[in-house]
Amino acid sequence: MSLSGTGNFRQPSCPAGSDSHRHPWHPPEINTSDPIASGQLLLRNTLTGQKEPFVPMKDRHVRWYTCGPTVYDSSHVGHARTYLSFDIMRRVMTDYFHYNVLYQINTTDIDDKIILRARQNELLRQLEEDKSVDYGKLVELAKTALEEAKAKSDEKKVAIEAALGEATTAKDSRGKTEQEELLKQHLVKRKNLDKDEAAISKVCGASTTNDDKDSRANLLVAAKSVLAEKLDREQGHLVTDHSVFNAHARKYEREFMEDMEALGIREPDVLTRVTEYVPQIIAFVETIIEKGLAYKSNGSVYLSLDAFQAAGHNYRKLNPAGPGGAATSAAEMAEGEGALAGGGSSEKRNPNDFALWKASKAGEPAWDSPFGSGRPGWHIECSVVAGDILGERIDIHSGGEDLKFPHHDNELAQSEACFGCNQWVNYFTHTGHLHIEGLKMSKSLKNFITIRQALENNTSRQLRIMFLLQAWDQPMSYSDQTIGDARSKENTFKNFFREVEALVRDDYLAQEVGWRMGDADHKLADAYLAARQSVHENLLDNFNTKDAMLALLKVINEANAYLHTPNVRPSTLLLRSIATYVSQILKVFGVVSGADDFGFGSGGDGKGETADGSGSESYIGAMVAFRESVRNAALEAAKGGDTKAAIQSILKICDGLRDEVLPTLGVRLEDRPTGTMWNLEDPEVMLKEMAEKAAKEKEVQIGKLEKQLVARTKELDKVKNSMVKPQDLFRTDEFKEWDEAGVPITLANGDPVSGGQVKKKKKAIDKQAKAYKDLMEKSGDNPEELLDAALKEVDSIKAKLEELSL
């Protein structure tokens, strides 16, 4: 705990003892106005719905459990949001507040979603290898699967709309909101199904033969979703090999861990798997049965909510409902039981009772147990693995917002039932949803961006900064704007570090030291201290990294304004202190790593590469001095107008060194009125910047050429039209007779041209006569030469556009 002062003094204290020669001491007054001023860490606790002072159970030891992934598919940016947020919080807790943290993550490697996806992929693999199913048969199978999927979708929509109508009639606002959200999600799923239908139709329409291997492969891809559901529905029970499920889970578990490493997320202190805890899970369930708080039914085991609450326990602590979970909706119960749930509520004593152990059906992995052949329920795993590693009292339990109910509430219930306590977890933390185009990013909605896709276009540092700029416990949107803002902030940090790096490179002791800019120095020092205070208070306030980051950016803006003061005589040491502090906090946040005093170093992705420039600074300095001398000489010569072409060539070479050669070596040069500033950078980052710059310049060039093409094409058409002699303008098959000026007087069918039309034609001929005369004058009576030049110019622009588009 650290204390804050009010700016006032308390009453003076005198040293004890009459023989003391000490004078009275005035102690600063302690600010006790709020917990943060008193140095208390506040943490939003989902159990209470508000911020609470964080107090570990014992000493400064923090036992922290986070729900890991269900490894059935690739992780997306929504997962990155959760695990990056908790990584940042963990780093702050260990590296800034210096708590002793034991951090555990569990991998869910057996679950309804894994079973479904593993079975589907296996059945699709078998179908792909089944040579008896030729292209023709596959077309029929895909079309049937599509029609079945559409029928199922229609039924689902009718059911949701009916439930929505009932909730509206009953004035059930919660139920209405729930069904409206389900309807919104359903419409997205239906849109995805329509896309599948279009893809299937396209493949079927493009093929001309039943023996087309490519068409068969393309159809398997286009119809993958609908075929997978149909095959699993009809043949899923035949997949019984445990290795199918195990291999699927291991593949995506490894991919998840690789993604976490790519994001710069620290590995947990302990990693556990459900499948390695089945004996402990069985023992855990037996303990709850022995206490009379769970019961067997048709090979499954359910926690009895009635018995649980009769024993004095509370249910739905995180997402409160009525007594006994009376307000639990059908959708929530379905979510709690999983996609492969069977038996309905008929085998339950209370519809809200949830499974601790599930009887396995055909096509599902199974383990022997006293309750029958089955598998662990979804929620039981976390209770068992966390209880085994962290004990019967956990300081912090974390997960995504969507896990509050039923998963975490059911975790609490079964753990408190087994351990005989009323509070298994002291603090629950949940990250807010990540939205994309107004909906939660979700695999079921197919509106997700995988972590690997996100890292193709952004660095891990940029993603981390993006999440740092958001409140971890609130919803956020993933968009070009949010990632663009992160890139902008990253550039602000980079540019500031470059400025300070250039300053500290000079021998400041060879100059006058101290503060030489009066009020400007004092103002900057005050901004620096204010930033440190603000960062500290914001981190105490529920890990408020958003405002902590803004505090860092604010002091950087102050420093930039200071550096741009006319006739600036900067305080190098103060600026270095600011840069070092900013870097220290960014290092705590995981944005910076490595041993440099300040800056990002040369690491393009924040993984810790440094830019110490060992052995190369003198070389770089000499090269910069040489280049600057050549450049200055050329500029001087240019003023006199001598050997202009040579001078321009020298300048071009200098710019080529700056823009093309040195970036490949990781050297950045910036020409300024006061001289050339250089910094070391990651060559890959600089090459990427060069590529992005070239792409933008290319885009601008294409835009200019397209405008030129439109203008030149209009001019070409004008020349072509103006080449028609005025008396020949209307000599077409539409007319039969004309007067001497070429005005048509008789239509092709012999009818006379109306007087009104004759007038219009005369005006058109007069206009054409002027255009023809202007053309003759402009071309020197040689319009063909002008036409040829216009055609060549249009063709030249088209060729340039084609070259740029390659």
Image (cartoon, rainbow, N blue to C red):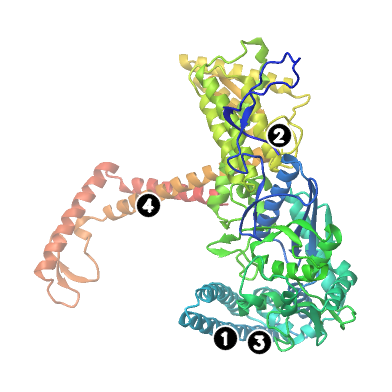
Query: Which residue is tagged 3?
Result: 140
Q: Nearer the viewer, residue 561 or 639?
A: 561
Image position, residue 193 (x, y; %) = 59, 76
Q: Which mark is residue 713?
A: 4
Which residue occupies 69% across, 47% down?
88
Secondary element type, mark 2: loop
Between marks 2 and 3, how big is the CA–CA gap?
Answer: 59 Å
Secondary element type, mark 4: helix
Q: Amino acid at mark 1?
A: Glu
Q: Which mark is residue 689?
A: none
Q: Nearer the viewer, residue 279 or 575?
A: 279
- How many neighbours does mark 3 have within 10 angstroms: few (below 14), some (14-19), or many (20 or more)? few
Q: Amino acid at mark 3?
A: Glu
Mark closest to the chain's N terminus, 4 or 2: 2
Q: Nearer the viewer, residue 300 or 240?
A: 300
Q: Is residue 276 left or right of residue 11?
A: right
Q: Is residue 362 left or right of residue 534?
A: right
Query: Which residue is tagged 2?
Result: 601
